[in-house]
């Protein structure tokens, strides 16, 4: 591994933090001391985030996080990048580490059964299994498991309402089925499966480690995954083996863009894309163009412009779900 290759750690852990604010300053100081960049969320229910840095520094910070109250069993997923996926370090205090808007749901008390990536294919090809993608519409659009249901949600907050409609439909059909849920790294499924159990479903499963662990573990020749997996950093998407995907990000609306999208006459780097071309006026495009010029100048100087849109932000009009 070269000195310039960066290690990226994606992590989350549900554990009670009675006073998450007291953890912020010491953890931020340690991250900065190790030149770590990325975002960590702290809430009364635990910690969530993605960070990047040199390999030794990342492992030093992971050791610090494991030392936080209740985090001794913390797990994480590692990937690698040749360019910085983040440009600064942020630690934010939140009400939830992934926002579902259902404060009574506690994954520590009730959650679906974990299924290892190696056993996932057998579960989702069982005709008695209903497979549900718990991610948002812009994520599902670039890749998912074959035959998975797309709830079409713009935010994870929308998932409970969708699921209750789904539950009502299942009740009318009068047929029980196994539910298999998945998301990017596993955190949304912790809450989604707990919610499903609260709504009366008992036979509920979810993919341990999420799509990222599946793509890392299951050989491509045996994989049932189709397309890319959206990630909340400057890589935008990854493929099997967690190799960088083929998507870029629109700096105007932050939607993931395929090669065909970037070949569209409506795509102007930094200004517009086929998703937002008709939603932006001349004043907005002029502002985006000015920002793009400043970003290009900053890149030529070897620096990062402060207005550079972060891929950790969700598309315009949505909320980021880690």
Image: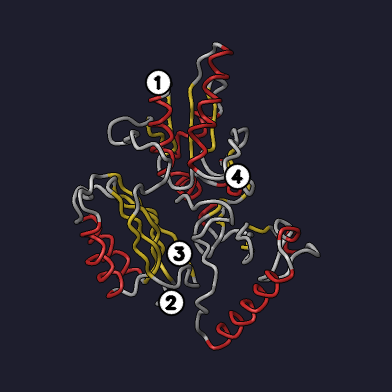
Q: Residue tagged by mark 4?
A: 137
Q: Residues within 10 Å of mark 1 (few under 14, many from 20)?
A: some
In the drawing, does residue 275 fall left or right of residue 303?
A: right
Q: Secondary structure at mark 4?
A: helix
Q: Nearer the viewer, mark 2 or mark 1?
A: 1
> Whole-Å distance between the Cαs marked 4 and 1?
26 Å
Between 72 and 273, which is closer to the camera in this rendering?
A: 273
Q: Residue tagged by mark 3?
A: 80
Q: Residue tagged by mark 1?
A: 202
> Whole-Å distance between the Cαs marked 3 and 1?
38 Å
Q: Residue tagged by mark 2?
A: 4
Q: Earlier in the sequence, mark 2 or mark 1?
A: 2
Q: Which mark is residue 20?
A: none
> Whole-Å distance between the Cαs marked 2 and 1?
48 Å
In the drawing, does residue 62 fall left or right of residue 301?
A: left
Q: Secondary structure at mark 1?
A: loop
Q: Earlier in the sequence, mark 4 or mark 3?
A: 3
Q: Is the residue 2 above or below the residue 112 in the image?
A: below
Residue 242: x percent and y percent? 51, 56
> Whole-Å distance between the Cαs marked 3 and 2?
11 Å
Which residue in the rendered view is the most extreme toward the top? 174
Q: Secondary structure at mark 2?
A: loop
């Amino acid at each position: 591994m070269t000195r310039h290759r960066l290690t990226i750690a994606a992590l989350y852990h549900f554990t009670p933090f009675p006073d998450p604010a007291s953890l912020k300053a010491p953890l931020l100081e340690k991250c900065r001391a190790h030149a770590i960049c990325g975002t960590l969320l702290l809430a009364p229910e635990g910690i969530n985030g993605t960070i990047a840095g040199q390999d030794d520094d990342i492992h030093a910070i992971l050791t610090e996080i494991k030392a936080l109250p209740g985090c001794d069993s913390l797990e994480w997923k590692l990937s690698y990048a040749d360019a910085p996926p983040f440009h600064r370090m942020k630690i934010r205090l939140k009400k939830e580490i992934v926002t579902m808007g259902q404060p009574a749901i506690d994954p520590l008390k009730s959650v679906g059964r974990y299924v290892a990536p190696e056993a996932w294919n057998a579960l989702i090809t069982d005709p008695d299994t209903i497979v549900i993608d718990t991610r948002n519409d812009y994520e599902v659009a670039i890749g998912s498991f074959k035959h998975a249901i797309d709830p079409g949600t713009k935010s994870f907050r929308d998932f409970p309402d969708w699921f209750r409609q789904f539950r009502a439909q299942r009740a009318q059909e009068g047929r029980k089925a196994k539910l298999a849920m998945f998301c990017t790294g596993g955190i949304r499924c912790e809450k989604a499966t707990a919610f499903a159990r609260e709504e009366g479903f008992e036979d509920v499963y979810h993919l341990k480690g999420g799509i990222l662990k599946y793509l890392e573990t299951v050989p491509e020749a045996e994989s049932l995954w189709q397309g890319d997996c959206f990630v909340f950093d400057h890589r935008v998407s990854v493929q099997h083996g967690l190799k960088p995907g083929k998507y870029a990000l629109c700096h105007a609306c932050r939607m993931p863009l395929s090669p065909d999208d970037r070949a569209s006459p409506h795509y102007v780097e930094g200004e517009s894309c086929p998703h937002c071309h008709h939603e932006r006026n001349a004043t907005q495009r002029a502002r985006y163009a000015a920002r793009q010029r400043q970003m290009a100048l900053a890149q030529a100087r070897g620096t990062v412009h402060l207005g550079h849109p972060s891929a950790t932000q969700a598309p315009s009009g949505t909320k980021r779900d880690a």
